[in-house]
Amino acid sequence: MSQLSSPTRQPTTAAEENTAIKYFYIATLACIALCGGLVWLSYHVGPYAVSLFLVSASTQTLLGLMVVTHYQRQKIVIPWGHLLLTAILLRAVALCGWPLFEDDFFRYLFDGYMTASSGDPYSLAPAALFSDETLPESVDTLLSQINFPEIATVYGPVTQWVFAAAWSLSPGNVWPFQFAAGFADLITLLLLALICRSSTQQNFLLLYAWSPLLIKEFSLTAHPDIYAIMFGVFALWLMRNSRWFLCGIAIALATGAKVFAVLLLPLFVVFDPNFRNLCRLLLGFAIGITVITLSFGSLSIWFPEGLSAMARHWVFNAPVYRALDHVVTIDQIKMIALATLTAIICWKMWEMWRQTDEQSKSAVLYRGQLFIFAFFLLCLPALNPWYVCWLLPFAVLWPSRWPFIWSCLVLLAYYTGFNIGGDELHRVPTSLLAMQVVGIVIAMLWDKRYPPFRVTD
């Protein structure tokens, strides 16, 4: 098994450090300008908006890779204070914008109202309230703008709590949702910084801090996946500090925000051979799941109507399904994917079980979760761009370039009729699916041929 190894370090001169800092701030100013352009674009969406956004995101990703590569070659660690400041500035700029290429935020607003007013966002679809004349004007205005109004919510119970809090802060406005998602993104960055031990991990934090996908999907568009990601990374930090009961609760909260966060649990279960710690972990998880369930009074919250409809009928940006569409049925692809994913999880659990020291176990955990989530995403019938954000924390902890490159390539999924005009509103052209797959493979080969320096914990 390959694991983190430490390269020989050479002294760094003050001149080299000053040059590196100069490059860092030049790139920072460029990224802030690009983020400002994104905000402008969010208010001036036109036929070339997707292309302009893709150019901007590609440039920002490339700048991040260049800065990290320079620091790695000079064997210098990017100053944490500088990195955090740039992350805050980029997200603060994005908060000034309007959700771009998305209308999901109308659903967030509606769910926030339903949870805050009745405590139940799951029983009624928006369409059921079309004729309700007692609704507040702020709710009545957004009802007609919700997509698929005949279907109830897709979002998990923990996410609904956040929606309710954001709605209560400023009913009918989207900025509290954007602020909450951007703040959770910064908390995730801070937690990753606490977990990082090697200089390579610390430098790769920059790619997370500058990620155009994260900035667009959370601070600008307010997608709620970040709450599950935040609790998942929090669970990693708790595990590293041997707080197993709280770790189990954190995984439960992550699952409550996004049900597929449960994929975190198997490798955590076999990380520590101490039976008491295993019991603490599972007890915390069980209590967390139970409390969340009792708060809403129904087990149906774990697989709501919207999620069920999406899993059964929705196919979007899914290269595996497009490639096998004429060979096997969609249901058969799902069964094959589920069986393969189960086998991969068992393999990674066995690999973890064989390790005898914490450093090797951590390496298997980070790399294993990265691989498990990457395979899971590729097998989803609907691969929305923000799902790739799940890979980025593990791409920091097991330093890898390809997930960050994927996070840029996946933005090609916005080339649909919904954003550029055309009859097929939610279909990504086959050529763009192929470009994503080829780009990911090339990026993986690049990482394999020229791996980032891996420095031991």
Image: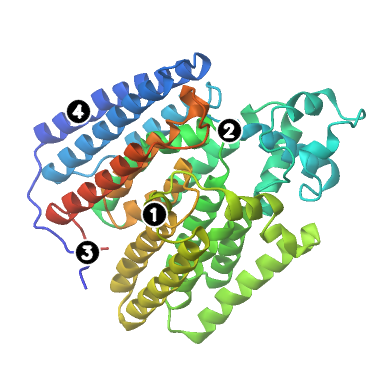
Q: Is residue 173 visible?
A: yes
- Tell me the CA gap for discs 3 and 2: 36 Å
Q: Which residue is mark 4?
A: 23
Residue pointed to by mark 3: 4
Alpha carbon distance from label 1 to label 2: 35 Å
Mark 2 vs mark 4, foreground winner is: 2
Quote the CA–CA distance across marks 1 and 4: 40 Å
Tell me the residue at 39%/36% (across/down).
Answer: 429
**Is residue 311 toward the left or the right of residue 158 in the image?**
left
Circle on res. 179: 2
Looking at the image, tell me whether mark 3 or mark 2 is earlier in sequence order. Answer: 3
Number of on-image labels: 4
Label 4 secondary element: helix
Q: With respect to residue 315, does 5 lie above or below?
A: below
- Give the CA separation, mark 3 to mark 1: 32 Å
* Residue 264, percent from left and from top: 48, 65
Q: Position of residue 312 (x, y in %)?
A: 60, 55
Q: Residues within 10 Å of mark 1 (few under 14, many from 20)?
A: some
> Could you say whether the residue bearing mark 1 is in a helix, strand or loop?
helix
Q: Nearer the viewer, mark 3 or mark 1?
A: 1
Q: How far is mark 2 from mark 4, CA to CA?
A: 30 Å
Q: Position of residue 20 (x, y in %)?
A: 17, 33
